Amino acid sequence: MGESISGAARPGVEGAGESTGVLGAPVDGLEEALAAADAFDRCLVAGLLRPRAEQAAGLAELARAVAGSPLAAPVTEAVEKAAAGTAGEDHLLVLAAARTALLGAVHDALTVRTDASTGRTRTDDTAPATGDPQQVNLLAAARTWLADLARAGWQGIDHELVGGAAQIVSAMLPRPELRRLAALLDGFAAELAASCPGSALERIPARRWGDLWARALLLTQPGATHRPTPGTATGRLLPLGIDLHEHATAAQAQVHAVFEPDDGTAPRLVRASVSVPKPDSVVAAGVWQLLRPHLSLLAALGEGRAMHLDAMPLTAEGDLLWDGTRARPGDPADAFATARVALPTATAAATAPLDRHPARLAEPVFLEGYTTRQDGDALVLTSAGDDLVVDTDRIPVAGPLTPETVAASGACIGLLRWDGGAFRLQPLAVETTVRKKTVALQAGAWAGGTTDKAGVRAEKAATDAVTVLRERAGRLLRK
């Protein structure tokens, strides 16, 4: 799920762009970089087999955008070949790299802005990838399929072309080092197949498909999917909140937390994630039942507890590779106490080069003393001179947090994101007043179980659905 990057623009909110704070100030070059990426994306709509004049102009805009970088010479050559309809796979790879570099620069500029707003420092311990020559044939096959897509264009896709990915994905899946790329190709192909024939599409998600195409093409480079051996983390883990993603056939929970090392070094921001397949009949709070057995941290957050880690694998990007045998429940830990005391001093890890994309921004922040207002259909939170649209679409129904409780809150733990040309806030937890008492509401409060009537019903429905599916699968296997 983490491979699917959506860059589709979302409508802004009138009045929400008049911020006077740090986040609302213009970012030099941002609009130009995005415009160049969009110009290239429009070239992929009609395809590069027989480029027209407007496609040549779009390619030239991409070349101008990277003219002052080390990519200038190879991109200029690739643009000339593509405009003539003679671009090879290596040329298309260069164009994908240029597009990725532009969006990476946007990501970096926005990250600098969020760090200025939060006062956060960032470390960079990322190591270069190394290649595996045994992967070359499969990677070359994937690169050829992606090149064929670029030549045909999104308007030219059909089931025969899109179906060419199936054999490649099947060959990659048994190899752990290639599963990341295989999952991306599989999801991308499924999305394209659902849109065939491309000639009949009324609307084409050019930015999204451009993101997926460029990322997949770069991951076909030997070593691109390799991750250096992770370090280890020993100390106290203080959860902040859960970011839940749910789709028809899969679900993912990502816990954002502050890690305090036992060696006394500075606390740091970390994440722990779990993804599971799910039947489409499992919805709402029932999804926790599928995720819970794979990540004991979910129960700890639901119970309001810290966890003690013992040599838990930790990547340079701040991702914990969860191993339940290396974690044990700790003392009670209030997420808002963590946000007030530990979060301001926590350092953040730099993002890996291929993950630098504005849609991937998700910076944990703590806000209080703000005001909220309704602006049309949007809820806007004003803090330190910045108007932040609250991303209510990201509040999961599998928890007690609602847009109404956010609007009535006085403190919020959230993720600062960038979408539709502006920063937005995804709430993870809020403090609000209920019957003259301050209470905390977590989006993931039901992760460890709940006595809420709606949550109990959803969990029971999930149990029934999974039981039926297991019985059916058992009968099929017996036959």
Image (cartoon, helix red, strand yellow):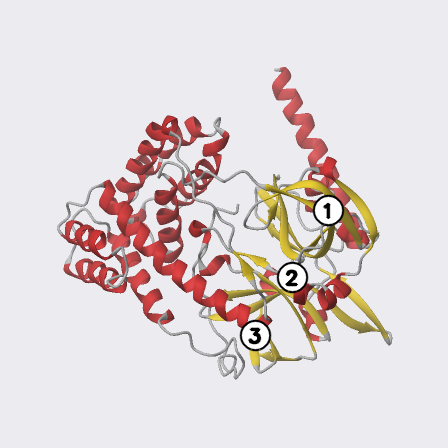
Q: Quick check: 348 above or below 278?
A: below
Foreground label between 2 and 3: 2
Q: Residue at x 23, y 54 (%)?
A: 75
Taking the image as shown, residue 245 lies to the left or right of residue 185, namely right
Q: Amino acid at mark 1?
A: Leu
Query: Tag 2, which secondary structure?
Result: loop
Q: Quick check: 263 above or below 106?
A: above
Badge 1 or badge 3: first in the primary sequence: 1
Q: Which residue is mark 1?
A: 297
Taking the image as shown, residue 406 lies to the left or right of residue 89, namely right
Query: Tag 1, which secondary structure?
Result: helix
Is residue 419 in view?
no
Q: Are the residues at dot 1 and dot 3 in contact (C-beta closer than 8 Å)?
A: no
Foreground label between 2 and 1: 2
Q: Please, which residue is most extreme toward the left here?
A: 84
Q: Quadrant of residue 159?
A: top left
Query: Tag 3, which secondary structure?
Result: strand
Q: Which residue is mark 2?
A: 346
**Label at residue 472:** none
Q: Residue at x 68, y 51 (%)?
A: 284
Q: Amino acid at mark 3?
A: Leu
Q: Nearer the viewer, residue 94 or 42?
A: 94
Taking the image as shown, residue 6 lies to the left or right of residue 229, namely left
Q: Quick check: 364 above or below 165?
A: below
Q: Dividing the image into 4 quarters, which one contains the C terminus?
A: top right
Q: Residue at x 54, y 38 (%)?
A: 229
> How much space separates mark 2 and mark 1, taking CA atoms?
20 Å
Q: Nearer the viewer, residue 224 or 95?
A: 224
**Label at residue 388:** 3
Q: Nearer the viewer, residue 93 or 399?
A: 93
Q: Amino acid at mark 2?
A: Ala
